[in-house]
Image: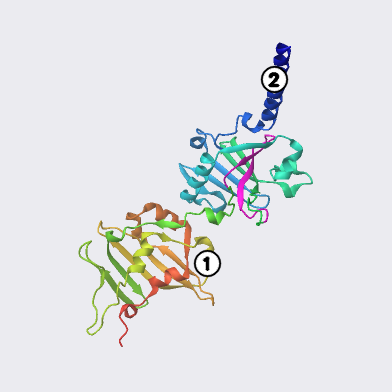
Amino acid sequence: MMAKKNLLITAVVLVAVAYGFQYFKNNNSGKQDPFVGKPILQSGIVESIDKITLNTPTTGVTLQKNDGKWEVSDADNYPVNMEKLIKLIENLSVSRIASLVTADPDKMADFNVLLPQDANDKKEHIGSLITLVQGDKILFQLVIGKNRTAVSQNASQPQGAGGSDGTYIRLGEKKAVYLIKDNLTLDTDSKKWLNTVLFRIEKDTIQTIDFKVGKDAFQFTRAEKKDELTLSDIPTGETIESNPVSGLLNDLSEFEIKDIVLTRDMGEKHLKLVSQARIKLFSGDGPSFEVFETGDTEKQYFIQFLPDTKSFSAELIKLNDKWTFEMEGWRIKKWLKAKAEYYQKKK
């Protein structure tokens, strides 16, 4: 009698274990997927790519590698902001696939991961698309869908109060939706991909800054790196303002432009030369440029580099031959000050 009872208990336990195993398997199917737990972008691909296309349903941008340098194809092959490009690749290489959400083809639209060719009457559910290419061969495609909204654990807060909690993605044409725990977005504005920092100069490497503003010519200079840059030929009775070139030095430490315009298109603008600046480093070279303003009510400011900049950066002169650079008004006005504006106001 005892043996039969033990046998019955064993049978019940085995059935429970079998049901438990099946339940665990069904509810952890994502862990069985070969992509779960791995980075979105596998190593070894990055070195091979020579073109990247970034597309949303309405906009797109193409980044192309030419002679070893990345350029924005949609901006007449202007150099790419490499920090931004590296960050994009880094995000794809670091972000790991957390789980398989569904492998049901009929549910792709629910997560906004449809490809344009599959959308038919569901165009509003097309995702953003990253494509990495080598020659004519697609090496990698990623569809970025909508964000998953976190559900707050605080009952007093509405659903979604916890903010975004990951992004739904699709790997190319694979009929599966995955979740990553990072918020992945795609910037397809070509202007946002331009390299807007033309050069960087360490402050203590600058020996002189020569200005010509209108008919007024003057110079800031120092004998050694440890000295402060001071205005030469100060009239008797005048005192120079405190830290007169601090703003100029900050600009030169990261010389940033607002936008680019093809020089061939500048003819329609009525430009007036308002300033010229020459920066000489202790090494002997340095950039020189002219500042122009438009005669419009809302003024725009543009710069063109002078030929003697070539010894400082031949690459910059090459860009200068094709483009004219627009500057932010608040930034460039530091370079338009007349000599007298550097004197301290008398009480």
Judge from the rendering whether residue 139 lies leftward or rightward of residue 111; answer left or right.
Answer: left
Q: Residue furthest front?
A: 1
Judge from the rendering whether residue 200 lies leftward or rightward of residue 191; answer left or right.
Answer: left
**SS at mark 1?**
helix
Q: Quadrant of residue 281?
A: bottom left
Which of 144/95 is in front? 95
The stretch of residues the image draws in magenta is 158-182
Which of 297/86 is in front? 86
Residue kind at label 1, given as amino acid type: Gly
Q: Quadrant of the N terminus?
A: top right
Which of 335/102 is in front? 102
Q: Position of residue 260 (x, y in %)?
A: 50, 60
**Can residue 50 be seen?**
no
Mark 2: few/some/many CA within 10 Å (<14, 14-19, 20+) = few
Q: Residue furthest left?
A: 223
Q: Residue furthest bottom?
A: 347
Q: Quadrant of the C terminus?
A: bottom left
Q: Residue at x 24, y 79 (%)?
A: 234
> Which is more foreground, mark 1 or mark 2?
2
Give the mark nearer the N terminus: 1 vs 2: 2
Cα distance between the residues tagged 1 and 2: 86 Å
Q: Position of residue 68 (x, y in %)?
A: 45, 41
Q: Residue at x 33, y 55 (%)?
A: 312
**Picture layout, residue 110 above or below residue 335:** above
**Residue wearing tag 2:** 14
Residue kind at label 2, given as amino acid type: Leu
**Residue wearing tag 1:** 267
Q: Position of residue 275 (x, y in %)?
A: 39, 72
Q: Quadrant of residue 177?
A: top right
**Picture layout, residue 118 above or below residue 159:** above
Q: Quadrant of residue 134?
A: top right
- Disc marking residue 122: none
